[in-house]
Image: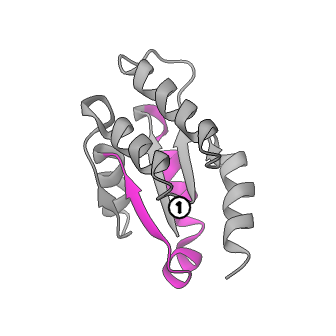
């Protein structure tokens, strides 16, 4: 199972906090984490093993969308900051569209991520 992780700047701490609550599940359930560059650096500093891609604005969102289109992902967790402007918003919209087209679960906030993550990992 591979889960992609993305967080806007104002939500990176939320992402690390979310993952910290599932440290045991992540270590025991054979889950691979992949993240955009800066988000991945924060996750890595918190003690998680993560494959880091490009930063979101530099193409990381598109890399994750390509993985979703090729059915390489079980889930995408993208903690968005809806109250801030993002210059790469077209990439964000493209990623969300690709998840919808290819039926990849997409959580954009911690509450949705918790429900989806617990369902995905309940089989382990």
Q: Check disc 1: other Cα within 10 Å, few if <14, some if 14-19, many if 20+.
A: some
Dot 1 corresponds to which residue?
A: 19
Q: In the image, is residue 107 above or below residue 23?
A: above
Q: In the image, is residue 79 above or below residue 5?
A: above
Answer whether residue 18 is visible to the viewer in this image: yes
Magenta region, residue range: 10-36
Residue sitting at x 28%, y 34%: 59
Residue 89 in which image quadrant: top left
Residue sitting at x 62%, y 44%: 106
User: Was residue 103 drawn as part of the magenta stretch in this picture?
Assistant: no
Q: Element at badge 1?
A: helix
Q: Residue 14, position in %: x, y?
A: 53, 46
Between 10 and 53, the one lying in front of the other is 53
Numbered label tally: 1
Q: In the image, is residue 56 above or below residue 87?
A: below
Dominant SS of magenta comes to helix
User: Was residue 17 drawn as part of the magenta stretch in this picture?
Assistant: yes
């Amino acid at each position: 199972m591979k889960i992609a992780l993305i967080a806007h700047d104002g939500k990176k701490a939320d992402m690390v906090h979310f993952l910290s609550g599932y440290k045991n599940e992540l270590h025991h359930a054979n889950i691979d984490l992949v993240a955009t560059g800066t988000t991945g650096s924060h996750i890595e500093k918190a003690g998680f093993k993560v494959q880091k891609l490009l930063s979101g604005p530099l193409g990381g969102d598109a890399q994750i969308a390509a993985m979703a289109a090729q059915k390489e992902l079980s889930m995408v967790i993208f903690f968005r900051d809806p109250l801030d402007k993002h210059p790469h918003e077209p990439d964000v919209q493209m990623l969300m569209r690709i998840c919808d087209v290819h039926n990849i679960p997409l959580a954009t906030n911690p509450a949705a991520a918790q429900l989806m993550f617990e369902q995905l990992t309940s089989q382990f």
